[in-house]
């Protein structure tokens, strides 16, 4: 989508929060607020009548909350969603609902500007949206885009997610995570490893006749015999 201006809907039951978004977005003239809503019912109606490109959506609203708005309209019919909330415990649900970003109130100018950059990339098609996986770090909560992840390995009751030389632990089963990431270009290499096909630099054979996926980072992931055919086909078709 290439435009000089994008239409924005602001949905929040707090007048101060709506005013805050208006003030922040004024510094970004490529975005224009076309409507404001106080609850979920108004938001659903405005999505139909105003056809915004972006909605800044409060998580907690009277009657129909932000997640219910997406569920009732369905994710495929939603504009790009940026969640607004005063609480961080909804982050996982927000990214599972395919939100582009998740802003904690009060929002700083610098944090809002970073969101605007992501919106521009998304709306121009320069950086297609990749679903996020929420992980906990020593600094708090982080969101890893699936196109940033190289591979994932099982680690007892956790999984370890690798991005370059850094790794993050997530308390989730491999089977559950597999269902989330396979549509994003991942395949099982063996029982305990999922690999993003786009991260594979080459496939090579070892002297022991084992097939290995060599990633751009240099990581070497063995491919089990029963998964070889599907994995090779996936790499060729990427």
Image (cartoon, grey):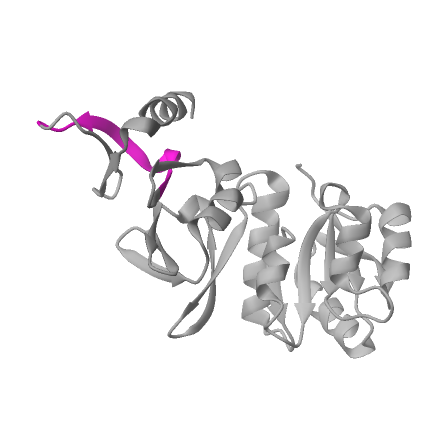
Instruction: Say whether residue 220 is magenta.
Output: no
Of residues 97 and 127, the one drawn nearer to the viewer in this rendering: 97
Q: Is residue 31 left or right of residue 225?
A: right
Quadrant for the C terminus in the image: top left
Of residues 151 and 130, the one drawn nearer to the viewer in this rendering: 151
Image coordinates for residue 236, horizontal then vertical, percent = 37, 21
Image coordinates for residue 105, horizontal then vertical, percent = 65, 76
Q: Is residue 209 left or right of residue 118?
A: left
Most prominent secondary structure in the magenta stretch? Answer: strand
Instruction: Say whether residue 204 is magenta.
Output: yes
Image coordinates for residue 11, horizontal then vertical, percent = 80, 64
The correct choice, above or below, for 19 with respect to 204 in the image is below
The answer to whether residue 30 of the structure is visible from this angle is: no
Q: Residue furthest left?
A: 207
Residue 14 quadrant: bottom right
Q: Residue at x 38, y 60 (%)?
A: 158
The correct choice, above or below, for 148 with respect to 231 in the image is below
Of residues 142 and 113, the one drawn nearer to the viewer in this rendering: 142
Residue 151 quadrant: top left
Quadrant for the N terminus in the image: top right
For the record, the magenta segment spans 194-207
The answer to whether residue 40 of the structure is visible from this angle is: yes
Q: Residue at x 65, y 53 (%)?
A: 97
């Amino acid at each position: 989508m290439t435009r000089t201006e994008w239409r924005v809907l602001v949905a929040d039951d707090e007048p101060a929060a709506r005013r805050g978004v208006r003030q922040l977005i004024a510094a970004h003239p490529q975005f224009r607020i076309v409507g404001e809503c106080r609850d979920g019912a108004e938001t659903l109606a405005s999505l139909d009548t105003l056809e915004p490109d972006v909605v800044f959506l409060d998580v907690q609203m009277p009657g129909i909350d932000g997640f219910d708005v997406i569920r009732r309209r369905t994710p495929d019919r939603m504009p790009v969603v940026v969640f607004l909330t005063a609480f961080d415990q909804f982050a996982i649900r927000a990214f599972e609902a395919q939100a582009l970003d998740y802003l904690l109130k009060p929002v700083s100018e610098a944090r809002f500007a970073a969101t605007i950059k992501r919106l521009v990339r998304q709306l121009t098609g320069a950086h297609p949206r990749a679903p996020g996986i929420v992980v906990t770090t020593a600094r708090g909560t982080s969101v890893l885009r699936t196109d940033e992840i190289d591979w994932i390995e099982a680690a007892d009751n956790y999984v370890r997610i690798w991005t370059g030389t850094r790794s993050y632990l997530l308390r989730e089963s491999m089977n559950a995570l597999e269902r989330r990431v396979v549509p994003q270009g991942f395949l099982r290499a063996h029982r305990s490893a999922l690999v993003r096909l786009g991260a594979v630099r080459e496939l090579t054979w070892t002297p022991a006749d084992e097939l290995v996926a060599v990633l751009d980072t240099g990581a070497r992931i063995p491919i089990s015999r029963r998964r070889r055919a599907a994995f090779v086909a996936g790499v060729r078709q990427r």
